[in-house]
Amino acid sequence: MEVFTRILGEKEYELKDHLGNVRVVISDVKLNGDGDQGGKSAPTAQAGQAPYMADMRGYNNYYLGGMLQPERHWSIKDYRYKHQGQESDPEIYGEGNSYAYRHRMSDPRVIRFWSVDPLEASYPYYSTYQFSGNRLIDMVELEGLEPTESGSYGGQGAIAPRLDDDGNAVEGTENQRWTWNNDAWNYTSVGITNSELTRLFSTGKPKILKGLESTLNLEGESYGISSNEELAGFIGQTAHETQKFRKLSESLNYSLRRLKEVFTDERLKYLSNEELKGYLKDNHKLARLLYIKDSDGVVPPGIDYRGRGLIHTTWKANYKSLSKTYNKIYGTSYDFTKTPSLLSTNIQIAVRSGLIYFKNHGLFDKEHFDIDDASSAINAGDTGSFGKRRREYNKVLKELNNLNK
């Protein structure tokens, strides 16, 4: 039988502020109210005195940019991690005067990097040596590449060359794609960045574009996205479905002509134009017409099951089927028939619902991706939209491939 031994005092914890700066370091030792380790129990503490105290190993106060404030920092030992959680390198310039980001070294005394930004081509409006986009209160530096919101989010994409041991760009890797995952940058062959999505869809909602970026970068490969064509196909199709990532639910504000183009089945077959105009005046009435009948014979409020998500999920039966598949993949217990709005309010769920649709219809893992086949699988009745979907696809593919030439 193996015996596990835990030695108190060897484990340390960092207390950080909103920018990830290490402000206090404590150990796993619990001190009593007198500052002594162990021995006395909580009731011995005097009135108004904390029964136990943390065993502090160090504290730091910083100027903007990361320079340590004189006489306002202390450490019981040389604890290396400080500003934005980065490793301090005191060997040449002294304590707290140099930080080792993954791609560059910074000098907090002048709040600049010592080498040129690997992403300088993507940020012509910045100095190539700037730090954190010169926004030192609300942004952090993403490993020497670019500014980002404090608390780097998993799935963020970037494009930068690989560097050798001397910090020089490796020839032929100028357009290497990276994904931020597990607190580190990782190489990836297929991915997208927020700046690319913003250039492609300037009117898209930032939160939707950010959720699209992170979910595709972290999970796209697991669904079978293995080429720029497949990635561009997914983004192009979902851009068309969501009005270029502005809306995650069907608005039902159709014109008569567009309504008849989209819904070509028997739902509208026996209604005159005048009757249809009456439906178009009331979204709830129109939704009941379009989505009232379902396989279980129940007549739900149709508007609850209008199109939602990146690939608009419609009908109660499809919401039920999506719940089952989603829960199986992610170990959750959602019932989207009871909470259909999640597909339009939770961006991660919205993106995942689209990925599930593509995978279930065999649109990934194909030898040759065909955008028209995908359009037919998504909405075969709306052939008039195929040209628009193809244009979105070509626009995204051009963006992706230009970086890989």
Image (cartoon, rainbow, N blue to C red):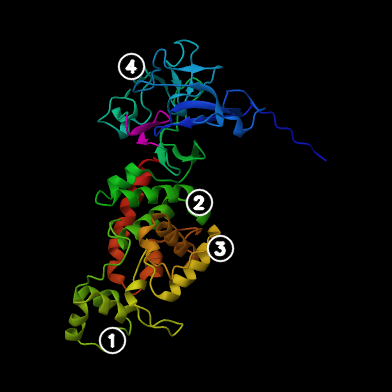
What is the number of the mark on residue 6?
none
Provide the residue span drawn in magenta: 137-150
Which numbered disc, 1 or 3, marks the residue that appears first in the sequence? 1
Callouts 1 and 3 close, C-beta under 8 Å: no
Whole-percent x and y of residue 356? 47, 62
- The residue pinned by badge 1 equals 269
Q: Residue at x 38, y 28 (%)?
A: 118
Q: Quadrant of the N terminus?
A: top right
Q: Residue at x 49, y 62 (%)?
A: 359
Instruction: Measure the C-alpha gap from mark 2 to mark 1.
Output: 42 Å
Task: Classify residue 32 as left or right of residue 197.
Answer: right
Q: Residue flagged by tag 1: what amino acid is it?
A: Lys
What is the number of the mark on residue 110?
4
- The residue pinned by badge 2 equals 221
Which numbered disc, 2 or 1, marks the residue that appears first in the sequence? 2
Front of the two marks 1 and 4: 4
Q: Residue flagged by tag 4: what amino acid is it?
A: Val
Q: Residue flagged by tag 2: what amino acid is it?
A: Glu
